[in-house]
Image (spheres, helix red, strand yellow):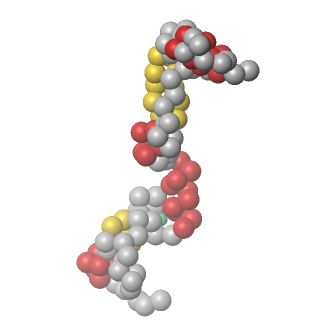
Amino acid sequence: MEDYTAEMIKDMAFSFCPQCGTAIIPNHKGRPRKFCSPECRSRWNNTHPKPENWKTVRSKICPVCGREFSYRHQYGLERKYCSRACANRGRGKEAKDAAVEY
Ligand SMILES: [Zn+2]
Ligand SMILES: [Zn+2]
């Protein structure tokens, strides 16, 4: 580990670790790092849910029972009903002639 003065670190620092505030110096590969250490990264991730996960949580009104429910939007699948029971009832209404799965 080379000896950097505080002044040098200030000039070189790409950013500061959001977990502990340590100045982060880009490594020689030039890849910007967000955290000073893997420990800080996992600590941060444990206390801060990822914003991309917030986006995937949707809330909807169930068309069968009228209750509001929230669900996680994944793999492009839309959830339409709050529960399986409502899904069965809703699908039954949508396609009267279709065979009902039980
Ligand atoms: Zn840190
Ligand atoms: Zn429902």
Residue 45, position in %: x, y?
Answer: 52, 53
Q: In which quadrant is the C terminus drawn?
A: top right
Above or below, 25 relative to 85: below
The residue located at (56%, 50%) in the rendering is 46
User: Is 39 situated left or right of 24 in this image?
Assistant: right
**Residue farthest along the bottom direction in this orientation:** 2
Closer-to-camera residue (82/13): 82
Above or below, 38 relative to 98: below
The residue located at (56%, 65%) in the rendering is 39
How many numbered circles are shown? 0
> In this view of the protein, can residue 92 be seen by the observer?
yes
Give the quadrant of residue 55: top left
The residue located at (54%, 20%) in the rendering is 81
Give the quadrant of residue 90: top right
Residue 1, position in %: x, y?
Answer: 47, 89
Residue 72, position in %: x, y?
Answer: 52, 35
The residue located at (29%, 82%) in the rendering is 8
> In this view of the protein, can residue 86 be seen by the observer?
no
User: Is 12 situated left or right of 56 in this image?
Assistant: left
**Residue farthest along the left direction in this orientation:** 11
Residue 22, position in %: x, y?
Answer: 41, 68
Closer-to-camera residue (63/72): 63
Give the quadrant of residue 17: bottom left
User: Is 4 situated left or right of 78 in this image?
Assistant: left
**Residue farthest along the right direction in this orientation:** 102
Closer-to-camera residue (17/4): 17
